[in-house]
Image (cartoon, helix red, strand yellow):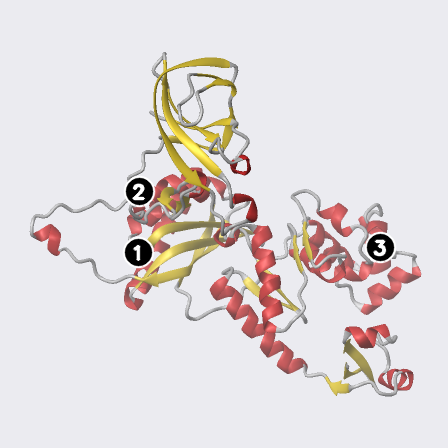
């Protein structure tokens, strides 16, 4: 199949399926030539207007689900600004793979590129060698150097001039001085090159979503001090709180965009563990991000967006009025600590239905109340992986060890309790069908209390090799 459209005075192929490309059909070929080359080619008229509508719908979906700054990248893609929101989707790598999976479910083939500049991401997504490309910080020039000059979105006249002067790859343009290069290719080509390298800003105009709560401020004079920025934050939060209150919503994430005098943008974002519209609390979180804002020559416009909101109803104060004890909500403390050290560093341990100790606990939302913990005695510090013990002396089949060496020190045991037998979870894999661990709680002569186990039951050889391991330390 191939799509044809009128380009200038003739009909050309504007898109072709992989099978047609394998038969020699390519974009830009005259329709008459394509028909003569492949007689049974399925020709269909292109619908640019319908394509634009579909891309606009995808951009609106991206604004609501992925990033508040998303826009159509003419004429076959999307731009997504992941600054400040990639951690909400598990990081850049995981988010990109989720995008590819989404495209597959929607019936599209997709290519994703992550780079420091929109121009570089645009070029790598269309001319790169892989479906998923991530460029580390500082590697933009090296990443786009092997790409053809057409990856810079140059005009046809600039591309013709590049072929005339022998410029085939972007690497051929990098060592040439800007003045002579501008005379050969034009100023627009130099701008595109500088935008891809990050020397010239290329802000993305996001797709507006009327359903996303937003507040905006346009200043009479540019500002650049922390005190002035804090005042603007307070004003924006007050306006946004009124919008959220009218809609019965609370913010889970906020994104502040500041437009500088030179056209650049400064973006900071915060997240909350629970929906809220309390201005004082949100302002405290936003103030932690002021130091990340580079005002340059001054900031003249601000926009505060709440891309992630949840319903927020009235709070039942019946227990408080009746004099009952009110359980404190740790959400505010969690938000402040996460704002200082990172959201991934704050978590709460929650139990998991598993007999195997290293699988019986997981990290969960710090503001969620964990489930009921089992009554089994477990060490206060459980190692991620058991560590082997050396020179162990113990009586078989079920006596605790009397002596062992761990981390270069010898421990003489004066008391012990056990065994507690734990079998492997046979439904996970075949290797755990016969796995057996006998755990003991032991105390050495210096008062140290340890949780050790022996692999195997000392009867059936398949249950374990009778090696000893330490799995945790009691308080």
> What is the number of the mark on residue 277?
1
Image quadrant occupied by the C terminus: top left
Q: Are marks 2 and 3 in contact (CB under 8 Å)?
A: no
Residue 272 located left or right of residue 56: left
| Residue 138 point in image, percent of width and height | 68, 42
Q: Where is mark 2, residue-wise?
A: 374
Q: Look at the numbered disc 1 and give the secondary structure of its residue.
A: loop
> What is the number of the mark on residue 169?
3
| Residue 393 point in image, percent of width and height | 47, 17
Q: Which of marks 2 and 1 is nearer the N terminus?
A: 1
Marks 1 and 3, how far apart in space?
Answer: 52 Å
Q: Look at the numbered disc 2 and give the secondary structure of its residue.
A: loop
Task: Inspect this view and state whether residue 46 appears.
Answer: yes
> What is the number of the mark on residue 18?
none
Q: Do the residues labelled 1 and 3 touch (CB within 8 Å)?
A: no
Rendered position, 430 above or below 443: below
Residue 379 located left or right of residue 12: left
Q: Earlier in the sequence, mark 1 or mark 3?
A: 3
Circle 2 or circle 3, nearest the eye: 2
Q: Which of marks 2 and 3 is nearer the N terminus?
A: 3
The image shows a total of numbered marks equal to 3
Marks 2 and 3, how far apart in space?
Answer: 64 Å
Task: Inspect this view and state whether residue 225 appears.
Answer: no
Is 69 in front, or is 223? 69
Is 275 in front, or is 413? 413
Circle 2 or circle 1, nearest the eye: 2
Neighbor class of circle 2 (other Cα within 10 Å; few <14, some 14-19, many 20+) is few
């Amino acid at each position: 199949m191939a799509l044809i459209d009128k380009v200038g005075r003739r009909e050309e192929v504007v898109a072709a399926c992989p099978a047609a490309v394998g038969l020699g059909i390519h974009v830009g070929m005259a329709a008459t030539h394509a028909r003569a080359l492949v007689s049974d080619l399925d020709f269909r008229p292109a619908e640019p207007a319908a394509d634009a509508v579909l891309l606009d719908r995808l951009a609106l979906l991206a604004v609501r689900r992925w990033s508040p700054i998303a826009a159509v990248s003419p004429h076959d893609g999307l731009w997504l600004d992941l600054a400040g929101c990639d951690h909400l989707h598990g990081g850049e790598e995981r988010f990109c793979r989720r995008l590819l999976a989404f495209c597959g479910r929607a019936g599209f083939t997709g290519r994703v590129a992550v780079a420091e500049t929109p121009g570089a991401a645009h070029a790598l997504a269309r001319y790169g060698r892989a479906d998923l490309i991530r460029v580390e910080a500082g590697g933009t020039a090296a990443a786009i150097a092997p790409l053809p000059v057409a990856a810079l979105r140059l005009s046809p006249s600039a591309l013709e001039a590049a072929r005339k002067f022998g410029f085939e790859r972007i690497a051929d343009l990098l060592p040439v001085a800007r003045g002579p290069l501008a005379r050969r290719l034009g100023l627009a080509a130099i701008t595109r090159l500088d935008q891809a390298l990050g020397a010239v800003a290329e802000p993305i105009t996001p797709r507006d979503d009327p359903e996303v709560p937003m507040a905006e401020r346009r200043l009479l004079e540019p500002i650049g001090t922390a005190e002035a920025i804090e005042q603007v934050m307070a004003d924006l939060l007050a306006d946004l709180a009124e919008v959220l209150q009218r809609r019965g919503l609370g913010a889970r994430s906020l994104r502040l965009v500041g437009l500088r005098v030179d056209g650049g943008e400064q973006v900071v974002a915060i997240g909350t563990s629970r929906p809220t519209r309390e201005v004082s609390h949100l302002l405290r979180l936003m103030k932690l991000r002021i130091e990340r804002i580079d005002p340059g020559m001054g900031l003249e416009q601000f926009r505060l967006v709440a891309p992630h909101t949840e319903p927020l109803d009235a709070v039942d104060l019946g227990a408080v009025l009746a004099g009952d004890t009110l359980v404190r909500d740790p959400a505010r403390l969690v938000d402040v600590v996460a704002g200082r050290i990172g959201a991934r560093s704050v978590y709460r341990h929650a139990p998991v239905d598993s007999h195997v100790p290293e699988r019986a606990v997981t990290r969960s939302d710090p503001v969620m109340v964990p489930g009921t913990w089992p009554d089994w005695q477990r060490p206060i510090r459980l190692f991620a992986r058991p560590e082997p013990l050396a020179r162990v002396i113990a009586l078989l089949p079920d006596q605790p060890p009397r002596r062992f060496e761990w981390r270069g020190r010898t421990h003489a045991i004066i008391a012990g309790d056990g065994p507690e037998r734990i079998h492997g979870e046979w439904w996970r894999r075949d290797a755990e069908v016969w796995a057996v661990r006998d755990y003991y709680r032991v105390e050495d002569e210096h008062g140290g209390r340890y949780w050790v186990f022996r692999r195997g039951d000392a009867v059936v050889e398949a249950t374990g090799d009778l090696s000893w391991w330490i799995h945790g330390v009691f308080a």
